[in-house]
């Protein structure tokens, strides 16, 4: 059973999940590859029996489903609560779900229709709202690993969701940073960033009615992009229907420009949203961070937390602007 | 010129170093490979003219050098101080050096003689002491990237050193954690860990006169190993000659057991030592963290800082104990 452990020095958590590996020395060597290439894909329509039963499924056009959510077969955390670790007691409770974004095996969030992308975003919201009702859950992380180098084990387009009984330290760091800025400036730091980057323009990737995409000033990764909602809101799950439509366009255009500029790179994206039941609505601002996997993270980064980024965000933004297809915006 | 930038929200630093890449969209695709395979190796004896001049060189047995230190040709930071960033002024000063560990092209810290490893450790110390004299420097990180998947671009065995004008946030986190424990317990937390793990044994990898190696309780990575000195000391540079000999044995045995158990995996190691000119001698405890690169870091880890580790440290330690060659100890 997966186990949450806390580092006694830094207070950082780790999840020990032996069920996710084979023998302890079983690790993939060499080039990154998907776990299954030609095998029947468990995420394709018709193969639903290969996955756990759906917890949410969005039907469409007379088809059984367009988006499908089910528990991860190899979860990092499980909902079996109340078990504790003998050495450092911690409630081992959590939820790990897979969100299959489309029945089309080869489609991605850069190629799907705007309507389909909007469906996926609405499903993210629905799951966050539902899981937020469980008083044991403090935070939900929605993320997408695209490509084997980004940690995806299956090719068929999917996102993942993990609900946690704790607020992760990196999330806390952001929330505290935003709180401190609000205390001294009485303004949201993300609102200020959006309002400065748009007229400045040199780190702006794109904009539409409700969102802007920027290469952040202190980008950790080459071609890192943040999608910021123009309206101040701490919680992704509170995004309106109209805003979801606008976000679908901004996300599709951003991902398509990365594909164009960088020959379809692997990437991770993460939705950063406020922890549940914490008063952060005034100063925190939900957003999406997209990180293409282009440079290797090495000893220096692990030892210090300081990333060495060979591409200035100003240069990344300029390159992406040259590859933007404005039609989905 | 490389630039240090601070994230306005979290306070984390990044280094923007465009000189380290070619064109902004120039990134290696596919399998990890060394930059040069069959080209003349700039780190081999006789090719010294291919690197910047040495700042330190240890002669041996009538040979011109056994260990050689020089500035990195593509530095993440340079000693050209006083330049500032117009948007967020920061002193752009630092040192980035390469430590070639041996003239033997294919040798590693798992295969070199104990005497040679000790020489490398003494060179690390000499550089730390020297760079610590510069009042602008707050911290030195010594790290090793082994294998292309771990971020090494050249095959010939080498370590790196970066001196920084700031204390990195991850280092500060450790120092603060150790300080808090000392405040409440009046003991060093690393001393306590070493004293508990040795008799407990289930996470112990090896021990010798002056060091123990453990798989830490909250291991972030499969087969992560920490080398802890038995004597309380905040600073690696204060390690005695005898202790360096003992460390050479512990390091060689640990790395050799990883090679045996996991078919010579890529790895990073980092020497964690106290920041300069900060009163942390009572409660901080220098150590080495070794992280084999076996599992991919993905969206969840980047978004939360929580690592999902598929190998329990108890299992990793047991596997490594079965592969320890005790002769260098």
Image (tube, coloured by chain):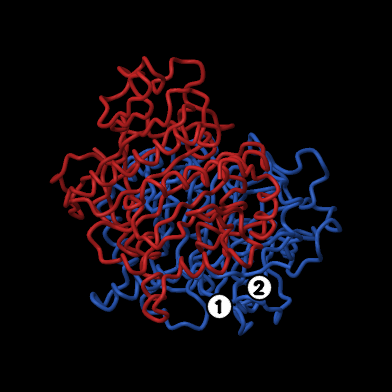
Chain colours: A red, B blue
Answer yes or no: do the residues labelled 1 and 2 have beta carbons within 8 Å?
Answer: no
Visible residue check, residue B155: no
**In the depicted view, which residue is nearer to us: B237 or B290?**
B290
Alpha-carbon span between mark 1 and mark 2: 10 Å
Q: Is residue B206 above or below residue B64?
A: above
Q: Where residue A310 sits in the image (x, y, percent)?
A: 67, 56
* Left/right of residue B37 with respect to residue B239 in the rendered view: right
Element marked by disc 1: loop
Q: Residue furthest left?
A: A82
Which mark is first along the chain, 2 or 1? 2
* Left/right of residue A175 with respect to residue A227 in the rendered view: left
Q: Is residue B77 above or below residue B250?
A: below
The residue at the point 31 percent across, 40 percent down is: A76
The residue at the point 59 percent across, 53 percent down is: A206
Q: Where residue A306 sits in the image (x, y, percent)?
A: 54, 63
Q: Quadrant of residue B91?
A: bottom right
The chain letter under disc 2 is B
* Left/right of residue B313 with respect to residue B119 in the rendered view: left
Q: Quadrant of residue B66?
A: bottom right
**In the depicted view, which residue is nearer to us: B253 or A247?**
A247
Q: Is residue B317 above or below residue B75?
A: above
Q: Locate the N terminus of chain B and report the quarter of the image it occupies.
A: bottom right
**In the depicted view, which residue is nearer to us: B242 or B132?**
B132
Q: Which residue is mark 1?
A: B138
**In the depicted view, which residue is nearer to us: B274 or B151?**
B151
Bin the neighbour count of mark 2 within 10 Å (Cα to Cα): few under 14, some 14-19, many 20 and up.
Answer: many
Q: Which residue is mark 2?
A: B94
- Tally of numbered tags: 2
Q: Is residue A8 above or below residue A328?
A: below
Disc number placed over residue A316 in the picture, else none: none
The residue at the point 38 percent across, 26 percent down is: A66
């Amino acid at each position: 059973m997966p186990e949450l452990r806390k580092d006694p020095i830094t207070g950082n958590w780790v999840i020990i999940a032996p069920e996710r590996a084979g023998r302890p020395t079983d690790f993939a060597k060499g080039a990154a590859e998907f776990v299954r290439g030609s095998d029947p894909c468990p995420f394709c329509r018709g193969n639903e029996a290969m996955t756990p039963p759906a917890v949410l499924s969005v039907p469409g056009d007379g088809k059984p489903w367009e988006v499908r959510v089910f528990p991860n077969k190899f979860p990092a955390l499980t909902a079996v609560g109340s078990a504790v670790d003998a050495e450092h007691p911690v409630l081992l409770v959590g939820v790990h779900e897979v969100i299959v974004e489309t029945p089309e095996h080869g489609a991605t969030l850069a190629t799907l229709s705007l309507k389909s992308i909007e469906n996926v975003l609405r499903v993210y919201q629905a799951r966050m709202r539902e899981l937020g009702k469980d008083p044991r859950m403090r935070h939900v992380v929605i993320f997408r690993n695209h490509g084997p180098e980004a940690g995806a084990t299956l090719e068929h387009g999917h996102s993942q969701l993990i609900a946690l009984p704790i607020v992760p330290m990196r999330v806390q760091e952001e929330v505290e940073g935003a709180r401190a800025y609000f205390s001294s400036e009485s303004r949201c730091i993300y609102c200020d960033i959006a309002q400065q980057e748009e007229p400045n323009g040199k780190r702006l990737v794109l904009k539409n009615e409700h969102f802007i995409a920027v290469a952040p000033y202190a980008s950790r990764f080459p071609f890192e992009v943040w999608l910021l909602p123009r309206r101040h809101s701490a919680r992704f799950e509170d995004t309106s229907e109209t805003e979801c439509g606008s976000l679908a366009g901004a996300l599709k255009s951003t991902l398509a420009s990365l594909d164009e500029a960088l020959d379809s790179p692997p990437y991770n994206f993460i939705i950063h949203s406020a922890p549940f039941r914490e008063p952060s609505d005034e100063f925190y601002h939900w957003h999406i961070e997209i990180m293409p996997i282009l440079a290797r993270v090495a000893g220096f980064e692990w030892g210090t937390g300081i990333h060495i980024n060979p591409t200035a965000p100003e240069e990344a933004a300029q390159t992406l602007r040259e590859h933007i297809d404005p039609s989905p915006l």
